[in-house]
Image: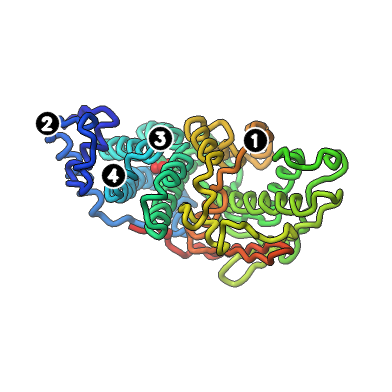
Amino acid sequence: MQCLRSPSSTLLQSLDTAKHTARRLIPSQRIRVVSGTAHFYQNKQLEVYASRETKRLTLRQLIFYGRSINEDRLIKSANYVRTELPVRIAHRLRDLQTLPYVVVTQEGIAKVYELYWSAFEKFRRYPQINTVEENQAFCAFLRTLLDEHSTVIPSLSLGMSLSSPYLEPERLDSFMRRMLVSRISRRVLAEHHVALSATYEARKAGDKRSNDHVGIIHTGLDVKKSIQRCTQYLRNRPLDIDNDFPPDKISKAEWSEVIVDGHLGTKFAYIREHLEYIIFELLKNSFRASRKAHPHENKLPPIRATIVAGGNHVMIRISDQGGGLMIPQIQSPSDLFSFSHVRNATRLQAERLGALRQVSTNPRGVWATVHEQVDNWQQTPDEFQRSTVSETEDNLNPHPRLGIGLPMSNIFATYFGGSLELVSMDGYGTDVYVRLPRLGTNLELIEV
Ligand code: COI
């Protein structure tokens, strides 16, 4: 059955069908009571998909399956993605439908809801893939969706900040966590499949080069090199990035040095963009804190990044002398991961909301940071360096902080069962401990 609907009517209709408790509150002029049948059918479909369990994977499964990719495996992978993504999206759509009306209609949230409905419908209707040519078309379809969804995180963050006064902090944060982990998981599956397809096509065309990637997973990721790559990028920025450094100091001072020590030869199989997202955000915070805590010193105290390869985990500790967290609005360091203004008062700051509004409509603006731009998984490190540096030039301008980096780093670290902990030594500095699974045997931590 073909459903004809305007984007904004979808949300209202689904709330209607779900007999949302707050329905009485919907201003009458906003309700478009259509026949109801089409949407009833749609919501029935949603329920069918939302009642299915997700087929969660481990990194190791993704590697083993993709290692010897052939036509048969590629087609199976395509159909797995085609059938698994609508299930994962359906769970989140149901989750959105259970939010209070005042939240779900909030700027940002409503936009995400519409994007997910549209993606759900497209996946649900996508025909089975049987040939390599059909898979090429499917990859083009995935790339378009990945692009269309590029502003989901700032939109969600904006919407949840605006909704913060209407939701318990626990509920808000657990909802956000489910949304963000699920989003990472969907993008991993889609991007992995697109990358596997590219490898398959390259091999078919005679490319015999050995590859240190299986899909999007780097099989021998060098932790020290990732730290150095992020350091080099961050240290190349002007010191007065926030426009708040004493002008007389700018010409002489430079960013802290980063000393890397510990098990320097550590390599493991992981998604490089996830590791570098985390390192990039943590180092960025440490650089900024060190500079702010020592405004009159030309030589800022170093930041130490220690790598330890344990039996089951790779651990990274980043220690700075940036004075510790000491943020008056924050009671415990983990509150920095919260999207609720009750735990983290910065969430409702007008400047931050304005910046989120801007990036959620313009992904090439401040949101175009090093990790967000790396969606071409086939790039060599040199190409990566060039493209990220050139694409992030906008970022060299001062801009209000979005407050997304730390919570997202926490979500990235925990996605395959790792952890991220902050320890503030108030008045001296901050230590951050990141623990990432080394064996790849943990299932994705997505909640239903
Ligand atoms: C997202 O980025 O939120 C997605 O769900 C991506 C997926 C539709 C390919």
Q: Which mark is residue 101?
A: 4
Residue at the farthest bottom position:
311
Above or below, 432 against 37 in this view is: below
Residue with the mark numbered 2: 35
Residue at 56 percent across and 43 percent down: it is: 402
Residue type at mark 2 is Ser
Looking at marks 3 and 2 on the same chain, the residue that comes earlier in the sequence is marked by 2
As measured in the structure, the alpha-carbon distance from the residue carrying label 3 to the one carrying label 1 is 25 Å
Looking at marks 1 and 4 on the same chain, the residue that comes earlier in the sequence is marked by 4
Residue type at mark 1 is Asn
Q: Nearer the viewer, mark 4 or mark 2?
A: 4
Looking at marks 4 and 2 on the same chain, the residue that comes earlier in the sequence is marked by 2
Q: Are marks 4 and 2 in contact (CB under 8 Å)?
A: no
Q: Which mark is residue 145?
A: 3
Residue type at mark 3 is Leu
Disc 3 beta carbon < 8 A from ligand 1?
Answer: yes
Residue with the mark numbered 1: 395
